[in-house]
Image (spheres, coloured by chain):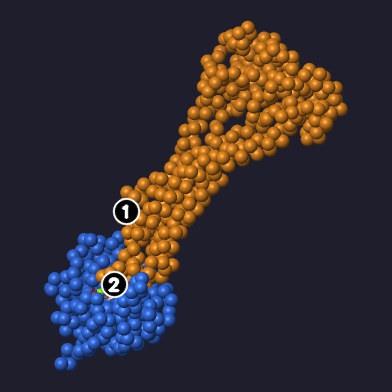
Chain colours: A blue, B orange
């Protein structure tokens, strides 16, 4: 369950108030949903609120049965650990840890035993085709490989919702599509994917596309249905 | 366990910086250990010295402190007064004496002369004393030299020892090593030393008691009967010395605090820099689901680990340094002046850890409170 009700975020900067997002209401159905819009339209702001990184100025967010807008910092972190996975545009991985340790990190937070952690992390790396890179550091991996490790990590605890903010932004189109394939592959059944992008071609591969403009939800497309 | 891995990874990723910080704490801790080791060494030397000290009571002029040689301020009448009280108080023997310290910083040219009256010999001060060469008694006009002193100043039997321009005495005896202060003393006849000092007075009366006499009681009775004297029992002197040592400890700790504060600032700086550089990492951890406590613990562990490793190395360096100092002072004055006792090692470790804790708390708090969105930065 991922639902937003009248979600609004305003930033006060001195005497100026910037409304980054206003009155966003939507219940995300299972499957992949893309969020598109020009730069500054509020895409990242929306994702920050849906994931509980930040609290809304107004409105409600429900993720996996928890009202994020009513929870404290650490409680939201707990909900994220259980319910959500993340892939950002870049700088996803912990640079001092190997690929394997990065993937195992959420398992560590969840209290999984070391031996099991290792096995599961290896299996996940295998799923994204990087089993042979398990002991590489992030700086020894290509951008596309780093994103795939990030996906493996995001999937570690089998989250109900996968959030991705411009995951293909730094990649060429071949690597980008490979990353996208992996994300879409996991947005099946009851699982959801929220994919923020400004690339309409990529957005077109989602089941729904939400268009943001100046912080408002202006259009909902369903390309697959068309 | 996992924390150890993360902490280790981060510290090794910034190896040079961690190394220098570690060294800084090690040096700070080592300097504290060395400073304080003198207090401990003196304490140990004092206890063993006093344990081997023959006389139970030492009578000096009022106001004389334990550490400086007493001036000849006690007139001969006082000696008679005490002699008169002796049978009643259970005093077995009274050894009037004067002392003369000559020379400077170099132990080879420093001389501690101790005047002995007729009928007394070094065994009255240090019962196990034995002559390695010659005899124990300096009378009528010789000098009996402690083992260390003889070795340092190259004194052998028959060599002349000059007490003043007019007075010179030959070495008539050399003592066996006793690993104590007695090793550095030179015993000469009391009359000779009084002549050198130009006085008929005494600096100190050493008093030996019958086995069943009560030391403190005798000391009190002496003080009550003879105005202007201090009658210190050996125990009392120990207690007094312990008090001065404690003051010395405080001063030494105060001095080493400077090094410690610098060490603490080093840790704080290292940890703060690494927190600043890893803001984004902490953001990623929090995004994935790490609670603030996790980040706090991570950063604090880093500081504590640095402090622990630095503290251990510092204590170890302190032990080595203390051994080096002792090798020298044993050579020079026949005493081990420095000691790294278990309690000193523990105390130093505790100080290093508290240092790490204090230095780590603020950066750790800061790191755990960065808002997630800010830590992740604008993407
Ligand atoms: N912390 C902040 N303080 C002030 N204003 C902010 C803050 N974060 C976002 N904004 C403003 O809110 C608006 C929406 O920003 P947001 O990052 O959500 O846009 P975006 O759609 O993700 O853009 P992009 O495609 O460039 O990433 C922008 O006008 C931005 O300047
Ligand atoms: Mg954005």
Q: Position of residue B280 (x, y in %)?
A: 31, 65
| Residue at 32% across, 86% down | A23
Q: Which mark is in front, 2 or 1? A: 1
| Residue A205 shown left or right of residue A107 in the figure | left
| Residue B217 shown left or right of residue B186 in the figure | right
Front-most of residues A165 and B305: A165
Residue ranking furthest to the front: A15
Q: Which mark is residue A153?
A: 2
Residue at mark 2: C-beta within 8 A of ligand 2: no
- Graded by Cα atoms within 10 Å as few (under 14), some (14 to 19) or many (20 or more), the crowding at tag 1 reads few
Check the residue under mark 2 and report the chain it is in. Answer: A
Quadrant in the picture for the C terminus of chain A = bottom left
Check the residue under mark 1 and report the chain it is in. Answer: B
Q: Position of residue A22 (x, y in %)?
A: 31, 83
Q: Quadrant of ligand 1?
A: bottom left
Looking at the image, residue B363 lies above or below residue B218: below
| Residue at 73% across, 26% down | B60
| Residue B298 shown left or right of residue B178 in the figure | left
Front-most of residues B300 and B183: B300
Q: Position of residue B34 (x, y in %)?
A: 50, 38
Q: Which mark is residue B14?
A: 1
Looking at the image, residue B318 lies above or below residue B272: above
């Amino acid at each position: 369950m991922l639902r937003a009700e009248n979600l609004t975020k305003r930033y006060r900067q001195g005497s100026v108030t910037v409304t980054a997002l206003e009155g966003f209401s939507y219940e995300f159905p299972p499957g992949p949903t893309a969020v598109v819009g020009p730069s500054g339209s509020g895409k990242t702001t929306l994702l920050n609120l849906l994931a509980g990184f930040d609290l809304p100025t107004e409105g409600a967010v429900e993720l996996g049965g928890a009202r994020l807008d009513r929870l404290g910092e650490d409680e939201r972190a707990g909900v994220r650990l259980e319910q959500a996975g993340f892939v950002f545009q870049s700088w996803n991985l912990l640079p001092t840890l190997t690929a394997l340790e990065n993937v195992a990190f959420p398992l560590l937070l969840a209290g999984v035993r070391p031996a099991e952690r290792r096995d599961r992390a290896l299996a996940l790396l295998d799923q994204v085709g990087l089993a042979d890179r398990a002991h590489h550091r992030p700086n020894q991996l290509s951008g596309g490989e780093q994103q795939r490790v990030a996906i493996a990590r995001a999937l570690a605890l089998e989250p109900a919702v996968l959030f991705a903010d411009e995951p293909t932004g730094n990649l060429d189109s071949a690597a980008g599509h490979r990353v996208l394939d992996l994300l879409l592959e996991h947005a099946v059944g009851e699982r959801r994917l929220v994919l923020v992008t400004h690339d309409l071609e990529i957005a077109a591969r989602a089941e729904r596309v939400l268009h943001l403009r100046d912080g408002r939800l202006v259009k909902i497309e369903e390309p697959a249905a068309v | 366990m996992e924390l150890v891995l993360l902490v280790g990874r981060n510290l090794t990723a910034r190896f040079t910086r961690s190394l220098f910080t570690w060294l800084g704490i090690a040096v700070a801790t080592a300097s504290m250990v060395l400073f304080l080791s003198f207090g401990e060494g003196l304490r140990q030397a004092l206890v063993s010295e006093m344990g081997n000290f023959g006389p139970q009571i030492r009578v000096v002029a009022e106001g004389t402190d334990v550490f400086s040689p007493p001036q000849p301020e006690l007139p001969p009448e006082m000696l008679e007064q005490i002699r008169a009280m002796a049978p009643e108080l259970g005093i077995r023997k009274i050894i009037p004496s004067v002392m003369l310290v000559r020379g400077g910083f170099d132990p080879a040219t420093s001389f501690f002369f101790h005047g002995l009256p007729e009928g007394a010999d070094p065994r009255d001060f240090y019962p196990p004393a034995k002559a390695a060469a010659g005899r124990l008694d300096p009378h009528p006009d010789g000098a009996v030299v402690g083992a260390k002193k003889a070795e340092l100043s190259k004194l052998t039997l028959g060599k002349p020892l000059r007490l003043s321009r007019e007075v010179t005495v030959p070495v008539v005896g050399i003592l066996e090593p006793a690993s104590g202060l007695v090793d550095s003393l030179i015993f000469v006849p009391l009359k000779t030393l009084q002549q050198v000092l130009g006085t008929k007075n005494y600096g100190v009366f050493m008093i030996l008691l019958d086995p069943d006499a009560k030391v403190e009681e005798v000391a009190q009775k002496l003080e009550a009967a003879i105005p202007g004297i201090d009658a210190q029992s050996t125990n009392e002197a120990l207690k007094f010395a312990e008090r001065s040592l404690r003051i010395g400890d405080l001063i030494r700790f105060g001095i080493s605090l400077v090094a410690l504060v610098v060490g603490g600032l080093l840790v704080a700086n290292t940890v703060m820099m690494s927190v600043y550089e890893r803001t984004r990492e902490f953001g990623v951890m929090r995004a994935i689901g790490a609670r603030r406590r996790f980040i706090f613990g991570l950063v604090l562990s880093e500081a504590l680990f640095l402090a622990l490793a630095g503290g251990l190395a510092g204590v170890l360096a302190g032990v080595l340094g203390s051994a080096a100092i002792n090798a020298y002072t044993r050579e020079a004055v026949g005493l081990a002046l420095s000691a790294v006792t278990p309690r000193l090692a523990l105390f130093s470790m505790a100080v290093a850890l508290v240092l790490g804790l204090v230095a780590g708390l603020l950066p750790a708090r800061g790191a755990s409170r960065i808002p997630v969105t800010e830590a992740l930065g604008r993407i």
